[in-house]
Amino acid sequence: MKIHHVGIACQDINEAIQEFRKHHTILEQSKIVYDELQNAYLCMIKADTGFDYEFISGEQVNKLSKKGVTYYHLCYEVDNLEEEIQKALNNDAKIISEPKPAILFQNKKVAFLYFSYGLVEFVEK
């Protein structure tokens, strides 16, 4: 399992990216897409920080972004999605969103779980 990206909640993706650009060099940026299954607008950024960032806006994150909460989740790329979910559930994690295809990741399946330290997304390799 390795870190895939950091999820950033925002009210306006374009505005958030412009703010991000003030502090970091953006090496690659995806198009902004709407994912019906996630009920959110999404955009991936590869930056000079060595990390990738997923900017998320929409109903999924409205309450958080209105409160000024921007760090939304940490995503791990996993070899076997079902196996990692089961391991997490066996260790007191709670499933928030069952596995489903994610348009931003070429329809690879993703799942969201809540751990004692926060929200985690798993994306299949």
Image (tube, helix red, strand yellow):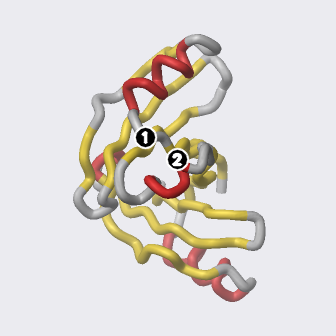
Is 30 in front, or is 34? 34
The residue indicated by pointer 2 is 65
- Badges 1 and 2: C-beta atoms under 8 Å apart? yes
x 26%, y 40%: residue = 33
Compared to residue 42, the image places residue 29 above or below, namely above
> Which residue is depicted at the point 36% across and 42% down?
42
Could you tell me which secondary element the residue under label 2 belongs to?
helix
Q: Is residue 87 left or right of residue 102?
A: right
Which x, y percent locates residue 23?
64, 14
Q: Amino acid at mark 2?
A: Ser
Label 2 Cα crowd, 10 Å radius (few <14 / some 14-19 / many 20+): many
Tag shown at residue 11? 1
Image position of 120 (left or right of 108): right
- Helix, strand or loop at label 1? It is loop
Is residue 21 positioned above or below 17 on the image? above
Mark 1 and mark 2: Cα distance apart in space: 6 Å
* Relative vertical location of residue 32 with respect to residue 102 in this rendering, above or below: above
Q: Amino acid at mark 1?
A: Gln
* Residue pictured at 43% horizontal, 24% vertical: 15
Q: Nearer the viewer, residue 56 or 95?
A: 56
Mark drawn on residue 91: none
Name the one closer to the observer, 90 or 61.
61
Q: Please name the residue shown 44% across and 53% down the image.
A: 62
From the viewer's perspective, is 25 left or right of 93?
left
- Earlier-in-chain disc, 1 versus 2: 1
